[in-house]
Structures are given as structure tokens and as C-alpha cells.
Image (tube, rainbow, N blue to C red):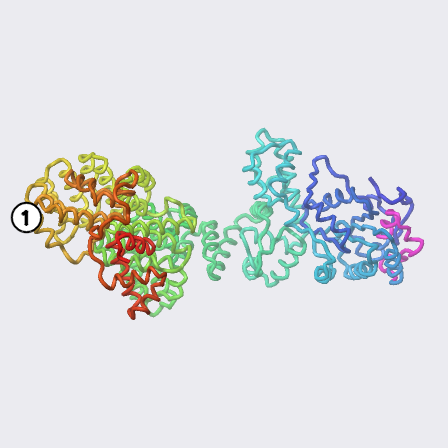
Amino acid sequence: MTVRNDNDEEPASWRVDPAGVPYLRTRLAPPARPATFLRRERLTRSLDQALSAPLTMVNGAAGGGKTLLVADWAAGLGHPLAWLTCDAADRAPGVFWAYVLEALHGAGMPVTSEVGSPAEAGSVDGGLLARLAAGLADRDRPVVLVLDEYDRVTTPEVAEQLRFVLDHAGRGLRLVLVTRAEPLLPLHRYRASGRMTEIRNADLAFTPEEAAKLLTLHGLSLPPSAVRALVGRTQGWAAGLRLCALAAGQSPDPETYLKEFEAGRSTVADFLLAEVLEQQTAETQDLLLRVAVLDRFCPDLVNALTSRTDAEHQLAALHRENAFLQRLGRSWYCLHPLFAEILRAHLRERAPGLEPELRRRAARWLRGSGALPEALAQGAAADDWEFTARALVDDLAIGQLFTGLRSQNLSDLFGRMSPEAAGPAADLVRAARELAHSDLRHGLLHLDQAGQALDRDDRDDRDDRDDRDDRDDRDRGAARLSCALLEVLAARLTGSPPRAERAVRAAEAAGQDVPARLLDAHPEFTALLLTHLGSARLWAGRFDAARAALNAVAGCPGGAPTAPARLEASNHLALIDYLTGWHGRAERKAQAAAAEAERHGLPKEAGSGIGRLVLAAVAVDRDELGRAEALLKEAGDPDRGFRDPVTEAGHAVIRGRLLLAKGDARAARETAQAAVPAAVTSPWAEEQVALIASAAHLAEGRPESALRDLERASDRRTVCAVERARAHLTAGRPDEARSLLDNLPGDDRPGPAVTVRATLVRAQTAHQAGDTGTARRLVARALLDARREQLRRPFLEAGPWVRPLLGAEPLRELTYGWLTPGPRSGPSAREVPAALVVEELSARERDVLRRLARMMSTEEIAADLQVSVNTVKTHLKSAYRKLGVNRRGDAVRRARELRLL
């Protein structure tokens, strides 16, 4: 195809430009489209807007598919088309306009006779341009003028002349610029007035769907994942996709080739080196080769790598030229990943040994600017492990090896650390990685080596005190603080609470030398330290002290960095609630922790799995044994992953309770009594083992064996006293049982899971004494307390004596819907006698209920009764308990059923 016009006239072949050189007809015709060309309708639709806007700019990098896109669109136009492929000679205004006039003549606009032509190559008469603009403005149909490779026209004079013609040609001219660089036109004015259409690099990039169609045209059929990977590597760059497709077509395994090809040794490299790199000056080539080692860069960083001072200007120019340089914002840039890969390969050939030095220089600059993750990546790539480990430790970022979102990346990075890397920082990092994977043998060894090295450094510092500066103190403080964090973790993993307390004191001392801003920048550090301390205190049975540490973490801000620690802290708090009988609280905390983990994208296996253990334990007491089994399976095998004594003991105890609930008493005892390696014995773990063993013996009719096992349990815990009372009662000693129940410890504040069992043992004592009324009343109280948390196991474990009571009125109604299945039967709710209220409501509780029935809020009730809001809440909580409900509406409805309102 040559040049189209309205009457299919072809320009005369003898015409010459002002320099006397014949016009090159190839410059006046759109290029032919290859058979593998893919028409992309979304871009064609964008180009259609060129007919309604004076200016259209298709601006993209070399090989972006600009020219073929416009040529394909132009082939279907119903308007006169003038095409000019620009050349370096067009920098001369006379030559440029002579070619433009020749292109317009070929489009059927006989402008040369009316307008004239430039007489000189280096200049053009202003009157000629005015006559040209006027002639275009008089046309009924606009002519579309495409200037391809316009980036070659760099003369400001030509740009100003083009603006003049465009502005005065009116609707008679539609200008399409195809360029690699921003033209010297007032683009902001055209954008502001809505007179410009733009297609840029991002628009030209192939989508995965378009890439799949392009590969099909090349005879390649690849799975979607392979196509997405190729688009990701090329960023949808048209020439890159086509060249890769051509090369893959010659490979026996195209999919593998596209996945593994070396960009530095490919036709893609040949194209980019020739079309982009070699078009630059020697200084700019050096700049591009040096920044290729960086994922992103700014002018100051580039100056540091090139020992220059003009990087800002150079980067802006490269971006304007679409030299595969992308602006990220705030003066930051990055290279096209494929171009960067090719440049790095070229750098290694051109300057062997320079890459590690550039990376070391970049690592130090990045660390100084606060970009720690990139500094670590560059230090590791330079094989400078002592710097990299020291940067992590001195910036107090060692906790990020544990914090979930980045921990795996950091662990993988330091997994490549050379064994020759020496110093306390390197040993601390090794210890952190190993302890994070519960590798105690190696972790404790490296932690000990780091501690000894820090002690030696401290002694040396005391000898050379005059040579120390503030930075030395800060870095040493950060190293000491990091060592203390790992010591607390080691204490948790080894079950050594005293070691944890010593480490916390050491952390407090080391923290005096660490700037507060450093701790503020790493909230995960304190969160992890307190979580490990709380776990160690929990192991020691110091529940209140453990809560103090864990609550500080569970309620701390910090977003994603502290999310893993908050998850662990909340789950440990849930475990404490479970161990003290507050199953509802435990479940809510574990579920809230799971929801937060999901919100932050943490994997299910994150942390120790204590949350799922707690949920499994609650499910056992609710007799939801299938759910408990599934949750235990989700919690994972305690012999794999993160292991500490709390988790291992919890797993053994809950598995034992599940086996007991399934009727396998022997297996329950054996499972619960499995040895848990720890430096210190845990009182609650011993207590739980004794309770399971006792329950197993009682299930087999051996109360004396149960009492022997309970000798290991605490005398000051209500749950243990209740189990002893049950054993004595089973052994036929009701007086001993009654004595234990009348003198229960008063300082451990047990929850319903304990108090329900205590109430049932009291009821059994009354039943054996023949006091059926008291037994019935106590069972009713137990039912009401248990119903709120769906505690079924206490009634199933109580023995045969309770079944007749549960099956008869008035207690039977209290079991429907949660303890026993079947339709509601017996007297209607309105016929239930008031005696079913275990305790009479106080006058004040009735006052609160009356106002509740009038839909008053808690604050309004407090104001009406002239009491505090907390007092109203206390009365409501007591009324809920007595009525056996847990919601406001249920309380009002129940009170009306019982004729209390």
C-alpha cells in the first residue's frame, strides 16, 4: 500500500524536497501489518475519538506496538489520510513541512499549488503556514495527518509551527502523533480544553487475554498460568511478547522455554540493547547499567551509585523518552523488569565485579534513608552478610522474622547467609530463624554464642570508653534488646518462666540505650516480647500476671506488624479463660482472634494453634465431639511447626478430654499423661492431667484411684476441690464431699464450667440424703447456668441419678432445645410456675426489668433510678442469670411468662 487519497491519485515520483533530495515514498505510506498482528478493539475504539479531537497522541516505548496499532486503525478510516514517518532530517523546518505538504497532497488535498512550498531546508515562511491552516479550515471533511516516530523531530521551531497550524486549521485537521517521547507541544492546554486523546504505555500493554490470543496466532497454546507469568515478566510489552513467541515456537517445549529463558541471551535482549541502550550517550548508558541492580531508585540514590550530581535531570529525560523507565511517584522510578534483567546481564559482561560493589553502596544508602527491606535485599545480593545481619539487628527489626506477613521472605533471605558470617548480629539472626522453627538445639547454641560475643564487646567498650560514641551505644543497646527478645522466646519454648523474667529485666535495662523512635517504629518488637512473657507466665500458672502481659498486646495498635502477636496473645487469653471455666469468654476471644487473622491475611497455620485448641476444648464440653475432632486436626500435630510446652500440654489435655468423652478412659489417661519437655513443671498442666485421670477412674468405678491422682492437684483451686468432692461422694463418703463443697477456695473466681459441676455435686449429695426438693432446685440452677454456654458434658458425666430428675417436670422443660432433643411438651411457657426461678429477683432487679420492658436504654434506666450505669448493668447481669437468659428481649419475655411483670 502506498498513499490513499479521495481519487486514488499517486504523487509523482519526481518530486524533491527543499534540499533537492527526492521524496522517499516509504515514509509516506503506513507499514504493512504482519499475519500475526492482533487487532485490539479497546485501543481501536480509543483511536476513533481522534476524529472528534484536534490532537491524538500515541506515546509509548520502543516495540510497544504503536505504529502497527495506528496503521491498522487508519486502514479502516473513511476520511482522507496523510501519513508521514518522521526522520532526523525533519529537524530542519523546511524539510519537515515539505514532507507534510507532500503527504497532504497524496491524501487528495492539492495544497502545493495554493499554499506553495518551502524554498529552503532550514526555514519556512510564516505566510505559507497561515495559508495551509486556512486551506485546511475551509475543508468540509477533515484530513487525518499521522506523524509516526515524531520523537525524531526535536526542533522547538517545528513544534511551535505545528501548534500554529493545528490551532488555526479548525475542524479541517486531525493530527495523530505516534511517539516515544513527550512532544514539545503545550499538551496541558489541549488536555484542559478536552481537545486531546491519549494512548500511553499502560494502555498499549497486552492484557493476559490479549496475550493468549497473540500466542495463538503464533501457533502456541499455553495454560492461563503460563500466559500470566509471561505477561508479568514482559509487563505486556508487545515486542517482548512477539519475540518470545517466535523463539518459543522454535523450542520443543514452548511452555518451559517461556518460563525459563535467559533474557540476557535472547532476541529480546538484542532488540532492547539496539533500540534503547545504544541510542543513549555513554554517560546515560552507564547510568542505566548501574541502576539495573535496583528494584526502584530516586535521583539521590542514583547519584550515590554513579558519583554524579545530575541524576534528577537524566531520569526525567529518560522517562520522557519512554526509555523503559517508569515513574513510581515522589521522584522514584523503576526499570521495566525485562529491561533491567537484560541490563544486569550486560553489566556483568561489560564490568565484571562491579555489581556487588554497586549493591553494597546501594544497601548502605537505602539503610541510611530508612528503606530497610530494600537495604537487606541489596546487602544479601552483594553477599555482605555481616552488614545485612547488623542492619536487621541494629534497626531493632529482628522481630520481623516472626511477624507473619514478611517473616517468610526474611527467613528465606537469611537462609542463604554464609556460614562464614561472624559477629553477634549474625548469630542473633541465626538463632531467631532457628527458634522461629522450634529448632531449640541450634537456636540456643547460636543465642549463647551471641550473648558471649556481646559480653566480650561490653568488656572491650569499658576498656576503650573514650573511643565510644552514641551510635555505638545505640547499636549495642539494640543488639542487647534483640538478644533479650530471643531469650524470652527461648524461655517460652523451654518452659522456663524464671529465665523469661530475667530476660525481661535485661530488656528493660538495654532499652535505656535505644531511642524511643526506634521502638515506636517497630511495635511488633514489644508485642512479641510481652506475648512470649505472657506464655511463660501462663505455663507457670500465674494467670493474673500472664493476663497483664497478654492484655497489653491484645489491645495494642499497630495494624499488620503486630497482628501475629495480637493473635497469639488473644488465644493465650482464651486458654486462660478456658482453664478457669469461662468457656463463653474463651470461645469469643478465640473466634475474634481468628477473624482478625483472616482480616490481615494470616495463614491458618500462623502461630501456635492455641485458638483452635481452645475452640476444640469448648466443643468437648458442649458434647460436639465431631467438631472438636475437626478443630484438633486443624490445630495440627504438636510435633510439627511451632512448639512450646503450653501448646503441647494443651493438645494432650484436650485430646484426653475428647477421648474421655468418647468413652475411652484408658486412652484418655495415657494421652493426657504424655510427657511434655520443660525446664519447670506447670501447675495447671499437672492439674489438668490429674483431673482427666480422676474422671477416667470415676468412669471405671475406681474412686480411690481417682483420689490418689488428685493428690497431685492444687488444694487452692475450686475445680480440684469439686473433683475431690465427686470422688468422695462416689466412694460413699458424703460428709467429706459436703465439707469440701462448703469450704471451696474463694480467690480463684471460677466460671460456669466449674460452678455447674460444683452445683451438680451438691445436688447429688442432697439426692443421696433424700432431699429431693433441694436436689431438684440445685439441678435447675445448674441447668440455667449451663444453658447460657451450652455445657452438656457435666450432665452426661454426672451419672444415672440425675436422669430421672431431668426427665420429669418441672426440670424437663429447661433441657429442651439444648440438652435434650424433641418437640416442646408439657405445660406452656405461661403455665410454668415461678418456682422455676432458682433465686427470687430482688426489688431493684424488678425495677430494672420494668424499665427494660418500656424499651429504655441502660443510660435512661440509670438516670430514672438515680444510680450509675454500671449498677444497672450489674442488676441486669444478675437478673439474666436468675432467668436463664442472656439477652434483653429474652429477659423481658421470660419475666412476663413467669408473671413477674
> In which quadrant of the rendered image does the C terminus lie?
bottom left
Q: Secondary structure at mark 1?
A: helix
User: Front-most of 152 and 588?
Assistant: 588
Answer few, some or many: residues within 10 Å of disc 1's Cα (few below 14, many 20 plus, some between 14 and 19).
few
Q: Position of residue 792 (x, y in %)?
A: 24, 43
> In which quadrant of the rendered image does the N terminus lie?
top right
Residue placed under numbered mark 1 in the picture: 735
User: Front-most of 240 and 895?
Assistant: 895
Query: In the shown orientation, is residue 297 left or right of residue 728?
Result: right
Please, what is the three-letter code of the amino acid marked with disc 1?
A: Asp
Residue 303's quadrant in the figure? bottom right
User: Front-most of 462 and 891?
Assistant: 891
Farthest residue, direction top: 252
Q: Position of residue 423 (x, y in %)?
A: 35, 54
Q: Residue at x 9, y 48 (%)?
A: 737
Q: Which residues are magenta?
A: 100-125
Q: Residue at x 11, y 41 (%)?
A: 706
Residue 619's quadrant in the figure? top left
Q: For residue 114: magenta?
A: yes
Residue 449 appears in the figure:
no
Q: Residue at x 9, y 43 (%)?
A: 768
User: Front-most of 46 and 129?
Assistant: 46
Q: Residue at x 71, y 51 (%)?
A: 58
Q: Position of residue 330 (x, y in %)?
A: 57, 61
Query: In the shown orientation, is residue 91 left or right of residue 648?
Result: right
